[in-house]
Amino acid sequence: MSVGFSYPIPVLLGLCVISAIACVFMLQRYAKSFDQGSLEERCSGSSESGRNPYQPPSELELQEQFHGLEIGQVKDRQLKVRVALPSICVLAAIAVGVGACLCRPIGNVGSVHYEMIVALFILVSLALLLVYLNHPTRHAFPHLFFQLESFSLWLAFALGWTLANRGVWDDLIVFTVFALACSAAVGSVLLVGLGRLSRSFSTS
């Protein structure tokens, strides 16, 4: 059942999506500054311990500093990818919501909404991509990042559907809440499994 269009609802959904992405961005910057601080401490500690301050750095120390710079550059590239991909997933979810709503008249065949099945497949694929991006060995706070990104993903789908439909569909609310809860639970389980698997490989 679809009720009349109400502007506060899509505005509220949009604000929730933007807030979640903003939190991810702020946490990314915090994680980056924390990683850079620990990297600088390791580099300075390894280069200054037991060395005469008037003696020029040795070739080994220069290699360590160069290696530290390379690690910093790699982390900068990873940060840009980590910031961009969740935002791209959110935009894709909005587009999927709009497309599912527009295809609803032709996707409903025999009381089966095939457009929602296709949309669910795409959204689950995006959620699995977010799980991969938040692999415990790739980034700090994997569960927190995933939950925020998953929250924004499913709300973005609801936002796109509501804007295209110009009204709130009751079943969409139930679908979004159920999908969000399942995504949060299954995603965390997968992150725990990936963390244990990576630790077992590192110790073997």
Image (spheres, rainbow, N blue to C red):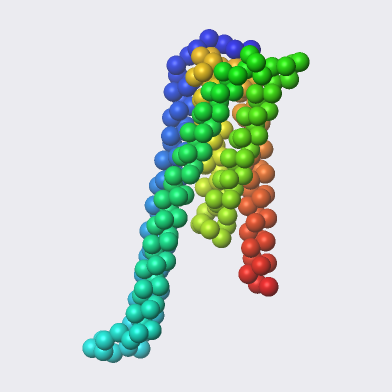
The image shows residue 85 at horizontal and vertical percentages of 48, 44
Q: Residue furthest front?
A: 106
The image shows residue 110 at horizontal and vertical percentages of 76, 15
How many numbered marks appear? Answer: 0
Q: Residue furthest right?
A: 110
Q: Pick the residue in front: 200 or 178.
A: 200
Q: Pick the residue in front: 118 or 191.
A: 118
In the rendered view, does 170 fall on the left or right side of 31? right
Residue 181 can be seen, yes or no: no
The image shows residue 176 at horizontal and vertical percentages of 61, 28
Residue drawn at (67%, 44%) of the image: 186
In the rendered view, does 48 fall on the left or right side of 124? left
Q: Quadrant of the N terminus?
A: top right
Residue drawn at (68%, 55%) of the image: 193
Q: Pick the residue in front: 61 or 29.
A: 61
Q: Residue furthest top?
A: 4
Give above or below for 121 relative to 160.
below
For residue 40, which quarter of the picture?
bottom left
Give above or below for 1 relative to 152.
above
The image shows residue 162 at horizontal and vertical percentages of 53, 20
Residue 4 can be seen, yes or no: yes
Give above or below for 6 relative to 85.
above
Q: Quadrant of the C terminus?
A: bottom right
Residue drawn at (73%, 20%) of the image: 112
Residue drawn at (65%, 56%) of the image: 194
